Image (spheres, grey):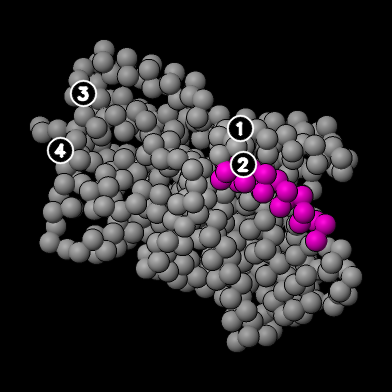
Amino acid sequence: MSLTAIGVIGIIILVIFLFSNMPVGFVMGFLGLLGFSYVRGLEPGLNLLAIDVFEVFSSYGLTVIPLFVFMGQIAFHSGISRRLYDSAYVLLGNRRGGLAMATVGACAGFSAISGSTNATAATMATVTLPEMKRYKYDMSLATGTVAAAGSLGILIPPSVIFIVYGILTEQSIGKLFAAGIFPGILLSILFLLTIYLRVLKNPSLAPPGPKTSLREKIKSFAGVLETLLIFGLVMGGIFFGIFTPTEAAAVGALLTIIISIIRRQLSWKGFIESLADTTRISCMVMVIVTGAVIFGHFMAVTRVPYDLAGWVSNLPLPNFAIMGVIILVYLFGGCFMDALAMIMLTIPIFFPVAQALGYDPIWFGVVIVLITEMGVITPPVGVNVYVVYGVAKDVPLEVIFRGVFPMLLALLICNIILLVFPQIALFLPGLMR
């Protein structure tokens, strides 16, 4: 049997296992070990397993993940998410559809200190859904907005997906973070526009809330300042070369703790829960990364990624058409697979293709994150939809999925704009040292 055939069989078995809801990291690691051992022998396979596990779990670069996750957990348990929403509510709540727009704004703000789409969706669903229900918002609009806006957590830095992509492709995590800022703002604006047009067409979806005075609006900015301070220090430090991403994560986590202590809104129980959740999430990510590294070495010895890259780059099609095929693969895969698992499985295969076609690796990373962002709200997996469903409890699943479809159109438009105008993502990284 040829090496290529062995690699293809390995990919097919992996996809089958992933569809059966088996743990992603363990499946990738186990199949990678079996495949590598089949090609090179059992002893080299076991050596590879020991080396890869040790190198991933002792990697200094990966310490950025638990630090950013810890920062987000402290922000959640100290009430920063609630203050963000309260500020957005005062500024936009009196407009028709204003609570849904405030939800988008609060999700964008919390994403800047969270880095996780699931955490953003769960946190904001807990905070915003009771308010929208109280003001008699259509639950399809309300839940769909939270699920979709929660996906900003993997685009607006600091993003765990960007960190993993940067490690897998050996790209600058700082530049990836900078590349996600303008697309994140653009997508937030498109979400707001989608809500506005939906409410304009059908005003009964979202009655206006109570009016607030100018003084109250000015006062509400206090709830945003702490988030801006944390985000500005973290991203500013990375952008100007003051901090490495790991140092910036540590500084951000420390600043979040200091703000929480000053406000006296972080209990000892909340601190312990933050540590526990950070440990659980970080270990999950590290196991997935380890499995992906082992499976990637199996793919490397079969040369499937390189053969595919060579074949695709020689197709008699323009580059944009080939990129369109790659995007369709991600769209289809995202319907069945978690975003992190999708990145882990496909980047070793498609990144060499993007390089062969001459695409900028930073821009490619942003495009791929945007595409996988669609996957977190599309059926049948739609992780964010299930997160919101778990919080809402009394809202049927089909109602939430119906609410996210208009937001999917906004995501699609954002992708098209980024494909046509790549400088939206590349402008800020181009200014970095």
Looking at the picture, which amino acid does disc 2 mark? Gly
Label number found at residue 5: 4
Highlighted range, magenta: 221-240
Residue type marked 1: Glu
Q: Nearer the viewer, mark 3 or mark 2?
A: 2
Assess whether mark 3 and mark 4 are in contact (beta carbons under 8 angstroms). no
Q: CA distance from mark 4 to mark 1?
A: 44 Å
Q: Is residue 346 above or below residue 425?
A: above
Task: Inspect the magenta stretch and tell me whether residue 67 lies in it.
Answer: no
How far apart are the alpha carbons under marks 1 and 3?
A: 41 Å
Q: Nearer the viewer, residue 203 or 358?
A: 358
Mark 2 = which residue? 237
Are the residues at dot 3 and dot 2 in contact (C-beta closer than 8 Å)?
A: no
Q: Residue at x 62, y 41 (%)?
A: 237
Q: In x, y percent, where is residue 38? A: 21, 23
Label 1 close to label 2 by CB (< 8 Å): yes
Residue 247 numbered mark, or none: 1
Give x and y (percent) for residue 199.
64, 81
Does the magenta segment cover residue 232? yes
Classify mark 4: residues with Cα within 10 Å, few (<14), some (14-19) or many (20+). few
Specify whether residue 143 is in view.
no
State the CA–CA distance, disc 4 to disc 3: 13 Å
Task: Give the label on residue 38, or none.
Answer: 3
